[in-house]
Image (cartoon, rainbow, N blue to C red):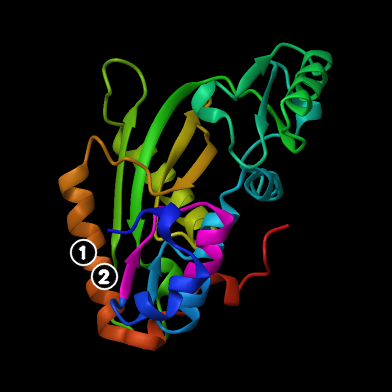
Amino acid sequence: MIDEDEVSEKHLPHTLSSFTHVLSMARGDGCLTVSAQWQAQGVNVINAPEAVKNCQRGKLNALLLAEGMIPPCHTAKHGFWVKPADGRGLHAGGAIYCRSMTEAMAMQRHFVDKGMDDTVVTAHIEGEIVKFYGVTDMPCRVSGADESHPIDFFHTYTADKQARSLPSRLHGTLQSTAMRLAHRLSLSVFGGDAVIQDNGQVAIIDINDWPSFSPCVAEAAVAIMSLLKVRESFGDRHTHYASTTYPPLV
């Protein structure tokens, strides 16, 4: 195990000779630069550094809007959320609910005062909050690969105290939507939050790399090991990422 703070470009030649796979939870710019170089040299990095960057809130919010997964702010009827675009400050309550756009704009100025110039404003969506976790080999499947047993692990539960399982129909709808989004972001290991609206529609409001998997650690570990074995089996051919099909996120 290597701490993110210990990884730098000067360590690249030494560490490259030590491994063929990296399970990276790093999000710092410096470490992402190094892991991109590892990947270019044939090391299998999960998640790919481009996928981690795609999960930054500014890029993610633009994609969710473009895909119609969240409503635009001008249609909001139940308030807004203001969040740092790069995810900073969320551990300290950085996602702030505002009742009006006037409050949201004032909160953006508050973030600027704290040194967070880049923020996103999203419409609040009424409904039941659901947590989800996933592992998939979809972003790296290649032509000719055996897809009879794809790796599509997916676990969901409601975010209330009961932590209930979803009905099979809703579970299937959320899984299909989340897997498609993960493919679009080049994510192989991911988690996030969704809202089940009163009309039965599913809205994904957040997705990120390397969640805790706290309610399903054992099952997720098996899926991640299967993912590593798939990468091992297909070698260089299996470093085909979704970004080679889709343009970079804006």
Seen in the picture, residue 102 relative to 11 is either above or below; the reply is above
The image position of residue 88, as x and y in percent, is 59, 36
Q: Residue at x 73, y 31 (%)?
A: 115
Q: Which mark is residue 225?
A: 1
Magenta region: 21-35
Seen in the picture, residue 14 relative to 8 is either above or below; the reply is below
Seen in the picture, residue 143 relative to 154 is either above or below; the reply is below
**Residue at mark 2:** 228
The image position of residue 108, as x and y in percent, is 77, 25
Looking at the rendered image, the quarter that the C terminus falls into is: bottom right
**Secondary element at tag 1:** helix
Residues at discs 2 and 1 in contact (Cβ within 8 Å): yes
Decide whether residue 24 is among the magenta residues.
yes
The image position of residue 118, as x and y in percent, is 75, 38
**Secondary element at tag 2:** helix
For the view shown, which residue lies furthest in the front direction? 10
Seen in the picture, residue 221 relative to 39 is either above or below; the reply is above
Query: Left of 87 or right of it: where is 25?
Result: left
The amino acid sitting under disc 1 is Met
